[in-house]
Amino acid sequence: MNAPDAETSRFARYAQFALLVLAAGALFPIMYLRQNFEVSLIEALGITASDLGDLNFILGAVVAVSYIPSGILADRVQPRILMSFSLLVVGALGFWMTTYPSLGALKIIYFGWGIAGGLCFWAAMLKAVKLMAASNEQGRFFGILDGGRGLVEAILASIAILMFREMSTPQDAATIRMTPVLLLYSSTAVILGILVFFVVKDNPDAVISKAQRAANKLAANSTLLKDLMLLLRMPQIWLVAGVIMVGQGLFFLTYSISAYLQVNLGLTALAAGSITLSKLWMRPLGGFTIGFLGDWFSREVVMAWLMLFASFSLLAMIFLPLGGHIYLVLPLVLVIGYITYAIKGLYWSLLDYCPVPPHLTGLAIGLVSFLGYMPDTVLPLYDGFLARNHDRAHSLNIYFITIACTGFVGAVLCVWLRKMNLRAAAAVAGAEG
Protein backbone atom coordinates (compact mmCIF):
# COMPACT_ATOMS: atom_id res chain seq x y z
CA MET A 1 0.00 0.00 0.00
CA ASN A 2 1.21 3.44 -0.85
CA ALA A 3 2.11 5.98 1.80
CA PRO A 4 1.12 9.58 1.24
CA ASP A 5 3.62 12.10 -0.08
CA ALA A 6 6.05 12.95 2.74
CA GLU A 7 5.84 16.66 1.87
CA THR A 8 2.08 16.74 2.36
CA SER A 9 1.19 17.85 5.84
CA ARG A 10 -1.20 15.83 7.95
CA PHE A 11 -3.66 18.73 8.03
CA ALA A 12 -3.63 19.12 4.25
CA ARG A 13 -4.12 15.39 3.82
CA TYR A 14 -7.05 15.30 6.23
CA ALA A 15 -8.57 18.38 4.59
CA GLN A 16 -8.40 16.72 1.19
CA PHE A 17 -9.86 13.53 2.62
CA ALA A 18 -12.73 15.49 4.21
CA LEU A 19 -13.45 17.04 0.81
CA LEU A 20 -13.56 13.59 -0.78
CA VAL A 21 -16.04 12.44 1.87
CA LEU A 22 -18.20 15.49 1.12
CA ALA A 23 -18.00 14.79 -2.60
CA ALA A 24 -18.87 11.11 -2.19
CA GLY A 25 -21.81 12.01 0.05
CA ALA A 26 -23.16 14.65 -2.32
CA LEU A 27 -22.80 12.86 -5.67
CA PHE A 28 -25.26 9.99 -5.37
CA PRO A 29 -28.33 11.32 -3.44
CA ILE A 30 -29.68 13.29 -6.39
CA MET A 31 -29.65 10.10 -8.47
CA TYR A 32 -31.79 8.37 -5.82
CA LEU A 33 -34.22 11.10 -4.83
CA ARG A 34 -36.89 8.40 -4.71
CA GLN A 35 -35.57 7.50 -1.26
CA ASN A 36 -37.25 10.54 0.31
CA PHE A 37 -39.38 12.07 -2.45
CA GLU A 38 -40.59 9.24 -4.70
CA VAL A 39 -44.27 10.19 -4.90
CA SER A 40 -43.57 13.93 -5.27
CA LEU A 41 -40.84 13.26 -7.84
CA ILE A 42 -43.20 11.13 -9.94
CA GLU A 43 -45.85 13.87 -9.82
CA ALA A 44 -43.39 16.63 -10.68
CA LEU A 45 -41.88 14.77 -13.62
CA GLY A 46 -45.29 13.69 -14.91
CA ILE A 47 -44.31 10.03 -15.07
CA THR A 48 -45.54 6.75 -13.54
CA ALA A 49 -43.94 4.52 -10.92
CA SER A 50 -43.15 2.10 -13.74
CA ASP A 51 -41.36 4.90 -15.66
CA LEU A 52 -39.30 5.73 -12.59
CA GLY A 53 -38.37 2.07 -12.28
CA ASP A 54 -37.21 2.08 -15.91
CA LEU A 55 -35.13 5.23 -15.33
CA ASN A 56 -33.45 3.65 -12.33
CA PHE A 57 -32.83 0.52 -14.39
CA ILE A 58 -30.95 2.65 -16.92
CA LEU A 59 -28.92 4.23 -14.14
CA GLY A 60 -28.13 0.89 -12.50
CA ALA A 61 -27.28 -0.84 -15.79
CA VAL A 62 -24.82 1.88 -16.83
CA VAL A 63 -23.16 1.90 -13.42
CA ALA A 64 -22.95 -1.91 -13.39
CA VAL A 65 -21.19 -2.25 -16.73
CA SER A 66 -18.86 0.61 -15.76
CA TYR A 67 -17.30 -0.97 -12.68
CA ILE A 68 -14.47 -2.86 -14.38
CA PRO A 69 -13.72 -0.13 -16.98
CA SER A 70 -13.72 2.46 -14.18
CA GLY A 71 -10.72 0.73 -12.63
CA ILE A 72 -8.87 0.81 -15.94
CA LEU A 73 -9.69 4.51 -16.40
CA ALA A 74 -8.58 5.34 -12.86
CA ASP A 75 -5.14 3.91 -13.70
CA ARG A 76 -4.76 6.35 -16.59
CA VAL A 77 -6.30 9.63 -15.36
CA GLN A 78 -5.69 11.43 -12.08
CA PRO A 79 -8.57 10.79 -9.64
CA ARG A 80 -8.90 14.53 -9.01
CA ILE A 81 -9.83 15.14 -12.64
CA LEU A 82 -12.26 12.22 -12.86
CA MET A 83 -14.05 13.11 -9.63
CA SER A 84 -14.31 16.80 -10.49
CA PHE A 85 -15.70 15.98 -13.93
CA SER A 86 -18.25 13.60 -12.40
CA LEU A 87 -19.52 16.14 -9.88
CA LEU A 88 -19.87 18.86 -12.52
CA VAL A 89 -21.74 16.54 -14.90
CA VAL A 90 -24.10 15.31 -12.17
CA GLY A 91 -24.85 18.89 -11.11
CA ALA A 92 -25.43 20.08 -14.68
CA LEU A 93 -27.83 17.21 -15.37
CA GLY A 94 -29.63 18.03 -12.12
CA PHE A 95 -30.14 21.60 -13.32
CA TRP A 96 -31.57 20.20 -16.55
CA MET A 97 -34.05 18.11 -14.52
CA THR A 98 -35.43 21.31 -12.92
CA THR A 99 -36.96 22.09 -16.33
CA TYR A 100 -39.01 18.86 -15.96
CA PRO A 101 -38.24 17.59 -19.46
CA SER A 102 -39.80 14.74 -21.42
CA LEU A 103 -39.34 11.08 -20.53
CA GLY A 104 -36.84 10.73 -23.36
CA ALA A 105 -34.74 13.55 -21.93
CA LEU A 106 -34.98 11.99 -18.47
CA LYS A 107 -33.51 8.78 -19.89
CA ILE A 108 -30.53 10.81 -21.13
CA ILE A 109 -30.17 12.40 -17.68
CA TYR A 110 -30.16 9.06 -15.90
CA PHE A 111 -27.76 7.61 -18.48
CA GLY A 112 -25.42 10.55 -17.92
CA TRP A 113 -25.64 10.11 -14.17
CA GLY A 114 -24.66 6.46 -14.62
CA ILE A 115 -21.59 7.39 -16.66
CA ALA A 116 -20.54 10.10 -14.21
CA GLY A 117 -21.11 8.03 -11.08
CA GLY A 118 -19.98 4.62 -12.32
CA LEU A 119 -17.31 5.09 -14.96
CA CYS A 120 -15.74 8.31 -13.77
CA PHE A 121 -16.25 8.50 -10.00
CA TRP A 122 -16.41 5.10 -8.29
CA ALA A 123 -12.94 3.63 -8.78
CA ALA A 124 -11.32 7.09 -8.80
CA MET A 125 -12.77 7.83 -5.36
CA LEU A 126 -11.66 4.52 -3.85
CA LYS A 127 -8.21 4.84 -5.36
CA ALA A 128 -7.78 8.43 -4.18
CA VAL A 129 -8.64 7.45 -0.60
CA LYS A 130 -6.36 4.42 -0.73
CA LEU A 131 -3.40 6.51 -1.88
CA MET A 132 -4.18 9.27 0.60
CA ALA A 133 -4.11 6.94 3.60
CA ALA A 134 -0.92 5.56 5.09
CA SER A 135 -0.58 1.80 5.54
CA ASN A 136 -1.79 1.97 9.14
CA GLU A 137 -4.72 4.26 8.24
CA GLN A 138 -6.52 2.22 5.57
CA GLY A 139 -9.22 0.81 7.82
CA ARG A 140 -10.16 4.05 9.52
CA PHE A 141 -10.11 6.03 6.27
CA PHE A 142 -12.49 3.65 4.51
CA GLY A 143 -14.68 3.33 7.59
CA ILE A 144 -14.96 7.09 7.88
CA LEU A 145 -15.58 7.29 4.14
CA ASP A 146 -18.72 5.14 4.28
CA GLY A 147 -20.03 6.57 7.53
CA GLY A 148 -19.12 10.09 6.44
CA ARG A 149 -20.96 9.65 3.16
CA GLY A 150 -24.03 8.74 5.15
CA LEU A 151 -23.60 11.74 7.41
CA VAL A 152 -23.33 14.13 4.45
CA GLU A 153 -26.35 12.49 2.83
CA ALA A 154 -28.36 12.87 6.03
CA ILE A 155 -27.43 16.54 6.40
CA LEU A 156 -28.35 17.32 2.81
CA ALA A 157 -31.60 15.39 3.14
CA SER A 158 -32.43 17.31 6.33
CA ILE A 159 -31.99 20.59 4.50
CA ALA A 160 -33.98 19.29 1.53
CA ILE A 161 -36.89 18.16 3.74
CA LEU A 162 -36.85 21.55 5.48
CA MET A 163 -36.96 23.36 2.13
CA PHE A 164 -39.70 21.02 0.91
CA ARG A 165 -41.76 21.91 3.98
CA GLU A 166 -41.04 25.62 4.44
CA MET A 167 -40.73 26.92 0.87
CA SER A 168 -44.06 25.58 -0.35
CA THR A 169 -47.44 24.32 0.82
CA PRO A 170 -49.10 20.95 0.24
CA GLN A 171 -51.46 22.70 -2.17
CA ASP A 172 -48.61 23.83 -4.44
CA ALA A 173 -47.85 21.95 -7.62
CA ALA A 174 -45.29 19.16 -7.27
CA THR A 175 -42.91 21.04 -9.58
CA ILE A 176 -42.89 24.02 -7.22
CA ARG A 177 -42.19 21.77 -4.24
CA MET A 178 -39.42 19.75 -5.91
CA THR A 179 -37.49 22.58 -7.62
CA PRO A 180 -35.69 23.85 -4.47
CA VAL A 181 -34.68 20.26 -3.64
CA LEU A 182 -33.21 19.67 -7.10
CA LEU A 183 -31.41 23.02 -7.02
CA LEU A 184 -29.89 22.19 -3.62
CA TYR A 185 -28.38 18.89 -4.71
CA SER A 186 -27.29 20.18 -8.12
CA SER A 187 -25.61 23.30 -6.74
CA THR A 188 -23.81 21.30 -4.06
CA ALA A 189 -22.41 18.89 -6.65
CA VAL A 190 -21.13 21.73 -8.86
CA ILE A 191 -19.50 23.61 -5.97
CA LEU A 192 -17.78 20.46 -4.71
CA GLY A 193 -16.65 19.62 -8.25
CA ILE A 194 -14.85 22.95 -8.46
CA LEU A 195 -13.31 22.52 -4.99
CA VAL A 196 -12.10 18.99 -5.74
CA PHE A 197 -10.39 20.18 -8.91
CA PHE A 198 -8.45 22.96 -7.16
CA VAL A 199 -7.93 21.53 -3.65
CA VAL A 200 -7.18 17.84 -4.12
CA LYS A 201 -3.59 17.28 -5.20
CA ASP A 202 -2.40 14.92 -7.91
CA ASN A 203 -0.64 11.80 -6.66
CA PRO A 204 2.32 10.59 -8.76
CA ASP A 205 1.43 6.99 -7.87
CA ALA A 206 -2.13 7.32 -9.15
CA VAL A 207 -1.37 7.02 -12.86
CA ILE A 208 0.58 4.17 -14.40
CA SER A 209 2.52 5.04 -17.55
CA LYS A 210 2.20 3.00 -20.73
CA ALA A 211 5.74 1.69 -20.23
CA GLN A 212 4.94 0.59 -16.67
CA ARG A 213 1.75 -1.14 -17.80
CA ALA A 214 3.65 -2.99 -20.51
CA ALA A 215 6.36 -4.04 -18.06
CA ASN A 216 3.84 -5.22 -15.48
CA LYS A 217 1.94 -7.20 -18.07
CA LEU A 218 5.13 -8.85 -19.33
CA ALA A 219 6.37 -9.62 -15.82
CA ALA A 220 3.07 -11.20 -14.79
CA ASN A 221 2.70 -12.99 -18.13
CA SER A 222 -1.00 -12.24 -17.93
CA THR A 223 -3.85 -10.81 -19.92
CA LEU A 224 -7.12 -9.35 -18.76
CA LEU A 225 -8.97 -12.51 -19.79
CA LYS A 226 -6.53 -14.77 -17.92
CA ASP A 227 -6.74 -12.60 -14.83
CA LEU A 228 -10.52 -12.63 -14.92
CA MET A 229 -10.60 -16.41 -15.31
CA LEU A 230 -8.23 -16.78 -12.37
CA LEU A 231 -10.57 -14.74 -10.18
CA LEU A 232 -13.70 -16.47 -11.43
CA ARG A 233 -12.24 -19.86 -10.46
CA MET A 234 -12.07 -18.77 -6.81
CA PRO A 235 -15.20 -19.97 -4.95
CA GLN A 236 -14.63 -17.31 -2.29
CA ILE A 237 -15.06 -14.59 -4.93
CA TRP A 238 -18.49 -15.96 -5.82
CA LEU A 239 -19.53 -16.27 -2.18
CA VAL A 240 -18.41 -12.72 -1.33
CA ALA A 241 -20.11 -11.40 -4.46
CA GLY A 242 -23.29 -13.24 -3.46
CA VAL A 243 -23.21 -11.79 0.05
CA ILE A 244 -22.68 -8.28 -1.33
CA MET A 245 -25.49 -8.86 -3.83
CA VAL A 246 -27.92 -9.75 -1.05
CA GLY A 247 -26.68 -6.92 1.16
CA GLN A 248 -26.98 -4.39 -1.63
CA GLY A 249 -30.47 -5.64 -2.45
CA LEU A 250 -31.58 -5.15 1.15
CA PHE A 251 -30.01 -1.69 1.13
CA PHE A 252 -31.59 -0.75 -2.21
CA LEU A 253 -34.99 -1.80 -0.89
CA THR A 254 -34.80 0.98 1.70
CA TYR A 255 -35.06 3.50 -1.14
CA SER A 256 -38.72 2.44 -1.46
CA ILE A 257 -39.61 2.73 2.23
CA SER A 258 -40.92 6.27 1.72
CA ALA A 259 -43.33 5.08 -0.97
CA TYR A 260 -44.37 2.09 1.18
CA LEU A 261 -45.15 4.33 4.14
CA GLN A 262 -47.35 6.56 2.00
CA VAL A 263 -49.09 4.01 -0.18
CA ASN A 264 -49.45 1.05 2.19
CA LEU A 265 -49.49 2.66 5.64
CA GLY A 266 -51.30 5.91 4.74
CA LEU A 267 -48.68 8.40 5.95
CA THR A 268 -48.42 11.84 4.36
CA ALA A 269 -45.51 12.73 2.10
CA LEU A 270 -44.05 14.94 4.82
CA ALA A 271 -44.38 12.28 7.53
CA ALA A 272 -42.86 9.59 5.31
CA GLY A 273 -40.03 11.92 4.28
CA SER A 274 -39.32 12.80 7.90
CA ILE A 275 -39.13 9.13 8.90
CA THR A 276 -36.84 8.17 6.03
CA LEU A 277 -34.74 11.22 6.85
CA SER A 278 -34.36 9.90 10.40
CA LYS A 279 -33.30 6.57 8.90
CA LEU A 280 -30.45 8.26 7.06
CA TRP A 281 -28.89 9.20 10.38
CA MET A 282 -28.43 5.49 11.07
CA ARG A 283 -25.82 5.22 8.33
CA PRO A 284 -23.02 6.98 10.23
CA LEU A 285 -23.90 4.97 13.33
CA GLY A 286 -24.00 1.68 11.45
CA GLY A 287 -20.88 2.42 9.43
CA PHE A 288 -18.80 3.58 12.39
CA THR A 289 -19.78 0.85 14.87
CA ILE A 290 -20.08 -2.36 12.89
CA GLY A 291 -16.37 -2.57 12.09
CA PHE A 292 -15.60 -3.01 15.78
CA LEU A 293 -18.06 -5.90 16.06
CA GLY A 294 -16.49 -7.46 13.00
CA ASP A 295 -13.07 -7.25 14.68
CA TRP A 296 -14.28 -8.69 17.98
CA PHE A 297 -16.23 -11.57 16.44
CA SER A 298 -16.23 -13.44 13.14
CA ARG A 299 -17.16 -11.07 10.33
CA GLU A 300 -19.05 -13.81 8.49
CA VAL A 301 -21.08 -14.67 11.60
CA VAL A 302 -21.86 -11.01 12.33
CA MET A 303 -22.95 -10.54 8.72
CA ALA A 304 -25.17 -13.64 8.87
CA TRP A 305 -26.98 -12.36 11.96
CA LEU A 306 -27.38 -8.90 10.43
CA MET A 307 -29.02 -10.37 7.33
CA LEU A 308 -31.38 -12.46 9.43
CA PHE A 309 -32.37 -9.43 11.50
CA ALA A 310 -32.85 -7.37 8.32
CA SER A 311 -35.21 -9.98 6.86
CA PHE A 312 -37.29 -10.30 10.03
CA SER A 313 -37.50 -6.51 10.45
CA LEU A 314 -38.69 -5.96 6.88
CA LEU A 315 -41.26 -8.75 7.19
CA ALA A 316 -42.46 -7.21 10.45
CA MET A 317 -43.12 -3.92 8.69
CA ILE A 318 -45.23 -5.75 6.13
CA PHE A 319 -47.26 -8.08 8.34
CA LEU A 320 -47.67 -6.15 11.60
CA PRO A 321 -50.72 -3.82 11.84
CA LEU A 322 -48.77 -0.56 11.72
CA GLY A 323 -51.15 1.59 9.67
CA GLY A 324 -51.49 5.04 11.21
CA HIS A 325 -49.21 4.23 14.18
CA ILE A 326 -46.32 6.51 13.33
CA TYR A 327 -44.65 5.97 16.71
CA LEU A 328 -44.43 2.25 15.97
CA VAL A 329 -43.30 2.78 12.41
CA LEU A 330 -40.47 5.16 13.29
CA PRO A 331 -38.43 2.84 15.56
CA LEU A 332 -38.90 -0.08 13.18
CA VAL A 333 -37.64 1.97 10.23
CA LEU A 334 -34.68 3.14 12.33
CA VAL A 335 -33.81 -0.48 13.14
CA ILE A 336 -34.06 -1.42 9.45
CA GLY A 337 -31.85 1.55 8.58
CA TYR A 338 -29.19 0.67 11.14
CA ILE A 339 -29.06 -3.00 10.09
CA THR A 340 -28.92 -2.37 6.34
CA TYR A 341 -26.27 0.33 6.74
CA ALA A 342 -24.26 -1.95 9.03
CA ILE A 343 -24.40 -4.66 6.36
CA LYS A 344 -23.22 -2.17 3.76
CA GLY A 345 -20.39 -1.02 6.00
CA LEU A 346 -19.13 -4.57 6.65
CA TYR A 347 -19.54 -6.55 3.45
CA TRP A 348 -16.43 -5.27 1.67
CA SER A 349 -14.25 -6.51 4.54
CA LEU A 350 -15.12 -10.07 3.46
CA LEU A 351 -12.92 -9.62 0.39
CA ASP A 352 -9.93 -10.23 2.66
CA TYR A 353 -10.94 -13.91 2.76
CA CYS A 354 -10.40 -14.26 -0.99
CA PRO A 355 -6.91 -15.48 -2.04
CA VAL A 356 -6.47 -12.65 -4.57
CA PRO A 357 -2.91 -11.87 -5.75
CA PRO A 358 -1.94 -8.30 -4.80
CA HIS A 359 -1.59 -7.17 -8.40
CA LEU A 360 -5.20 -8.24 -9.10
CA THR A 361 -6.81 -6.46 -6.15
CA GLY A 362 -8.23 -3.65 -8.27
CA LEU A 363 -9.61 -6.04 -10.85
CA ALA A 364 -11.13 -8.15 -8.07
CA ILE A 365 -12.88 -5.08 -6.65
CA GLY A 366 -14.24 -4.26 -10.10
CA LEU A 367 -15.42 -7.83 -10.70
CA VAL A 368 -17.07 -8.18 -7.29
CA SER A 369 -18.64 -4.74 -7.73
CA PHE A 370 -20.05 -5.80 -11.10
CA LEU A 371 -21.59 -8.94 -9.63
CA GLY A 372 -22.50 -7.64 -6.19
CA TYR A 373 -24.18 -4.43 -7.30
CA MET A 374 -26.48 -6.12 -9.81
CA PRO A 375 -29.49 -5.33 -7.58
CA ASP A 376 -29.02 -1.67 -8.52
CA THR A 377 -29.79 -2.74 -12.08
CA VAL A 378 -32.30 -5.54 -11.62
CA LEU A 379 -34.47 -4.30 -8.76
CA PRO A 380 -35.75 -1.12 -10.47
CA LEU A 381 -36.76 -3.30 -13.42
CA TYR A 382 -38.44 -5.79 -11.10
CA ASP A 383 -40.23 -3.00 -9.23
CA GLY A 384 -41.42 -1.52 -12.53
CA PHE A 385 -42.66 -4.92 -13.70
CA LEU A 386 -44.66 -5.38 -10.51
CA ALA A 387 -46.08 -1.85 -10.76
CA ARG A 388 -47.31 -2.54 -14.30
CA ASN A 389 -49.09 -5.76 -13.32
CA HIS A 390 -50.53 -4.93 -9.89
CA ASP A 391 -51.92 -1.95 -8.05
CA ARG A 392 -49.16 -0.04 -6.27
CA ALA A 393 -49.97 -1.24 -2.75
CA HIS A 394 -49.96 -4.89 -3.83
CA SER A 395 -46.82 -4.49 -5.95
CA LEU A 396 -44.94 -2.94 -3.02
CA ASN A 397 -45.95 -5.83 -0.77
CA ILE A 398 -44.65 -8.38 -3.27
CA TYR A 399 -41.48 -6.34 -3.79
CA PHE A 400 -40.71 -6.09 -0.08
CA ILE A 401 -41.49 -9.72 0.72
CA THR A 402 -39.31 -11.19 -2.03
CA ILE A 403 -36.30 -8.97 -1.27
CA ALA A 404 -36.68 -9.51 2.47
CA CYS A 405 -36.51 -13.28 1.94
CA THR A 406 -33.17 -12.99 0.14
CA GLY A 407 -31.65 -12.09 3.52
CA PHE A 408 -32.07 -15.73 4.56
CA VAL A 409 -30.10 -16.78 1.46
CA GLY A 410 -27.40 -14.26 2.34
CA ALA A 411 -27.11 -15.70 5.86
CA VAL A 412 -26.56 -19.18 4.38
CA LEU A 413 -23.84 -17.81 2.08
CA CYS A 414 -22.10 -16.21 5.09
CA VAL A 415 -22.11 -19.52 6.97
CA TRP A 416 -20.81 -21.29 3.87
CA LEU A 417 -17.97 -18.77 3.59
CA ARG A 418 -17.21 -19.20 7.29
CA LYS A 419 -16.89 -22.98 6.93
CA MET A 420 -14.68 -22.59 3.86
CA ASN A 421 -12.40 -20.21 5.74
CA LEU A 422 -12.16 -22.56 8.72
CA ARG A 423 -11.22 -25.45 6.44
CA ALA A 424 -8.58 -23.31 4.73
CA ALA A 425 -7.16 -22.22 8.10
CA ALA A 426 -7.07 -25.83 9.30
CA ALA A 427 -5.27 -26.91 6.14
CA VAL A 428 -2.63 -24.20 6.62
CA ALA A 429 -2.19 -25.16 10.28
CA GLY A 430 -1.82 -28.81 9.32
CA ALA A 431 0.78 -28.02 6.69
CA GLU A 432 2.77 -25.92 9.11
CA GLY A 433 2.54 -28.59 11.81
Image (cartoon, grey):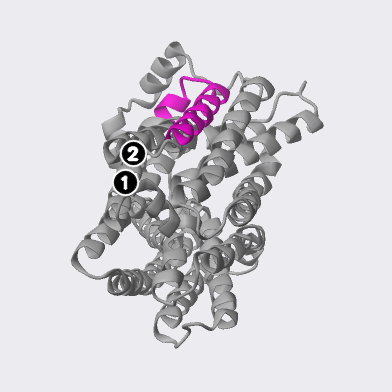
In the rendered image, the vertical position of residue 190 relative to residue 40, given as above or below = above
- In the shown orientation, is residue 182 left or right of residue 394? right
Q: Which of the numbered marks, if any, corresponds to residue 199?
A: none
Q: Residue at x 44, y 70 (%)?
A: 262
Amino acid tagged 1: Leu
* Residue type pointed to by label 2: Leu
Residue 298 seen anywhere in this rendered image of the structure = no
Q: Identify the image quadrant of residue 387.
A: bottom left
Q: Which residue is mark 2?
A: 106
Would you name the residue on which mark 1 appears?
Answer: 55
Residue drawn at point x = 36 percent, y = 31 percent: 69
The residue lying toward the viewer, choosing from 232 and 63, is 63
Q: Which residues are magenta?
A: 71-96
Q: Earlier in the sequence, mark 1 or mark 2?
A: 1
Q: Residue furthest left?
A: 389
**Tag in front: 1 or 2:** 2
Residue 195 painted magenta: no
Q: Nearer the viewer, residue 167 or 368?
A: 167
Residue found at the far top of this picture: 211
Question: Distance of mark 1 from mark 2, alpha carbons?
Answer: 7 Å
Q: Nearer the viewer, residue 400 or 120?
A: 400
| Secondary structure beneath label 2 | helix
- Indicate left or right for 319 with 169 as reference: left
Q: Residue at x 44, y 87 (%)?
A: 320
* In the image, residue 93 lies in the stretch drawn in magenta: yes
